[in-house]
Amino acid sequence: MIRIYLIILSAVLMSLSFHPLGLYFLAWFGLVPLLFAVTEVRPFSAFKSGTIFGFLFSLFSLFWFVFLQIETNIKILMLFGLILLFLYLGVYYGVGFLFMNKVGIWSLPLILAGLEFVRGAGELGFPWLAFGYSQARYPLFIQQASLYGVYGLSGWLILINVIVYKLIKSKNPKYAIAFIMAFTLPLLFGVIRMNRAADEPILIGIVQPNIDPNLKFTKAMREVTFDRLIYLSEQCNKAALDRFDQSPDLVIWPETATPIFLTFPGVYQNRVYALAQRINSPIFTGTPIYDRKKREIYNGAVLIEPKKGITQEYRKIHLVPFGEHIPFDQHIALFKKIDLGGGDYTPGTRFTVFRTGDLKFSCLICFESIFPELSRTFVNDGAGLLVNITNDGWFGKISGSQQHNDMAILRTVENGVPLVRCANTGISMVVDKYGRVLTESSLFTQNFILHHVSIVQDKTVFRYIGNAVPILSLLIATLLLVVKTVKTKA
């Protein structure tokens, strides 16, 4: 019975490190009770304990899904899907702790970090709750992500937990020394990396209109939406002229800010063109895009420049599974007939790097900000700024928006570039290339952010090697298992 209490305690501690309570440090030792529960048990018990932990950890961390502002009939179906999701996530931990049972406790950082990478891959990828994201608000600690990404950061956290467990269990001073080394080396690296001169900045304006996503696409709200976007943009421009004697270098609107196909000529397109001309600033906005030739709809974004109109567009590459499309529907025709009440978007294929003046930037639409390889590709293609546009109004006021927001922070450290985030209902923010949040908005407020952003890139190891470390971790872990099996049979 005590084992189940230890499992629950670990699930609670790790979950609390993912909620906006300022308890992110709990992840440094949150796995320790679980380690006491799963060591020196039979293999099946290790698997079962890990799966139960994973299920409860997911439940306690993602319970806010229940409060998503969606239709009732879809919510009932979603509740069933959530149980399957939590079980699915739990199995990863079950496999990880089964592996540890076979190979040894020091293999745990390798296998769990590697499994997080696997869980985030492909059309069904869901890297939410990767342990490394719990540290997003600790700039000094997350600098190590510039070397091996968020999954490597997860491996470091798991290693810290293993050392703490060993120290408590054996009381051997060598583990105290190991803990000090494992804790202070990343801190020292963070201090050295962040101790660099600031670069020449550009002025960014972020518009947070706070439009109810359930009403956004109704005809009655169309005028309200455009009036609010235009008003806030003009107020942002006025503030820029008053404070800095210049218009913003870029004004950003959120995901699907315009509830019409802005690429089609008409009164609303003319209003936005006129606004860009009036404030003398490029406007970057999310908008649905319809391709007449292919007869396909995309979740997209466009750049509107004064005197030029729409000059470039981006079509979202990684769509939300079951929310924006049915996974693999591009490859299996039967799947196109499935309707779960979500969107029916087509994924884009082009990694667009927008250019306006001297600024080069790329766009991450909503869910895309949680996938490291997308951002890495954009930056390696020339983007000096990442722009994350999103509509998190569905998440409510609990933890979803904060978790989604914090994951985007790691993209800056991994790639050595800043990020600006524009959310319809919040959280909007400006993050420098070291993952420091320079300013952020409150949830469900109508406002704008005006802030300077330094653009010059830092070259990072992660930009060159990508997720090589978690892949290598899986290979090493597999090799250890093979060696262990051969020795056992011998």
Image (spheres, helix red, strand yellow):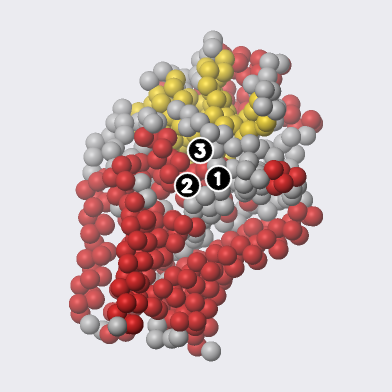
Q: As drawn, is 34 to the left or to the right of 180?
A: right
As drawn, 318 above or below 139? above
Q: Circle 1: is it few (<14), some (14-19), or many (20+) Cα within 10 Å?
A: many
* Amino acid of disc 2: Phe
Report if residue 323 is visible in the image.
Answer: no
Per the model, the C-alpha gap separating discs 3 and 2 is 9 Å
As drawn, 1 above or below 255? below
Q: Exactly how many numbered labels are in the figure?
A: 3
Q: Which residue is mark 1?
A: 367
Marks 2 and 3: in contact by CB < 8 Å?
Answer: no
Per the model, the C-alpha gap separating discs 1 and 3 is 8 Å
Residue at point 28%, 38% (across, down): 459
Task: Specify the label residue 364 is tagged with.
Answer: 3
Residue at point 64%, 64% (across, down): 84
Which label's residue is closer to the chain start, 3 or 2? 3
**The image quarter in which residue 325 lies:** top right
The answer to which of 180 and 47 lies nearer the viewer is: 47
Residue at point 69%, 40% (across, down): 344
